[in-house]
Amino acid sequence: MIPVPAGVRIWIATGATDMRRGMNGLALQVQQSLARDPHAGDLFAFRGRSGSLIKILWHDGLGLSLYAKRLERGRFIWPTATEGAVVITPAQLAYLLEGIDWRHPQHTWRPQSAG
């Protein structure tokens, strides 16, 4: 799991991204398409057309990091908008990275009584 510090915003870049891009290409996309500063400390998540690969760009104050995760089965749940970005919480990011629908997570059933 990515150590997300308090106060950091997590942005999902909507639409499909060319997953051949590396750190510099994704940082440029953050700057031009999302009109955000890629070096401000926020996390930026990108997904390709197939939906099985996600890349997360993060500047921790010392340098730029690029995290990647590929699902062996299934797809990452992504917003339906085609451009712009969506802000999510660290908890929603954890769901997203586990392949769970972060928009409507299913909570575990709890019994109503002990007996």
Image (spheres, rainbow, N blue to C red):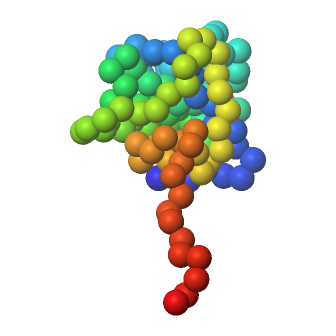
Residue at 64% across / 9% down in the picture?
Answer: 32
Judged from this view, the residue extending furthest toward the left is 72
* Residue 64 appears in the figure: no
Image position of 26 (left or right of 4):
left
Residue at 58% across / 39% down in the picture?
Answer: 103
Image position of 54 (left or right of 9):
left
Residue at 70% across / 43% down in the picture?
Answer: 8
Q: Position of residue 96 (x, y in %)?
A: 48, 41
Judged from this view, the residue extending furthest toward the right is 7
Q: Position of residue 74 (x, y in %)?
A: 31, 35
Place residue 27 in its image quadrant. top right
Image position of 14 (left or right of 98):
right
Q: Is residue 66 above or below residue 106?
A: above
Place residue 47 in its image quadrant. top left
Judged from this view, the residue extending furthest toward the bottom is 115
* Residue 69 appears in the figure: yes
Place residue 104 in its image quadrant. top right
Q: Position of residue 75 (x, y in %)?
A: 36, 32
Q: Is residue 38 above or below residue 104?
A: above
Please give the count of numbered marks on the rendered protein: 0
Residue at 65% across / 44% down in the picture?
Answer: 89
Q: Is residue 102 above or below residue 76?
A: below
The residue lying toward the viewer, choosing from 21 and 18, is: 18
The residue lying toward the viewer, choosing from 59 and 107, is: 107
Q: Position of residue 97 (x, y in %)?
A: 44, 44
Q: Is residue 31 above or below residue 12?
A: above
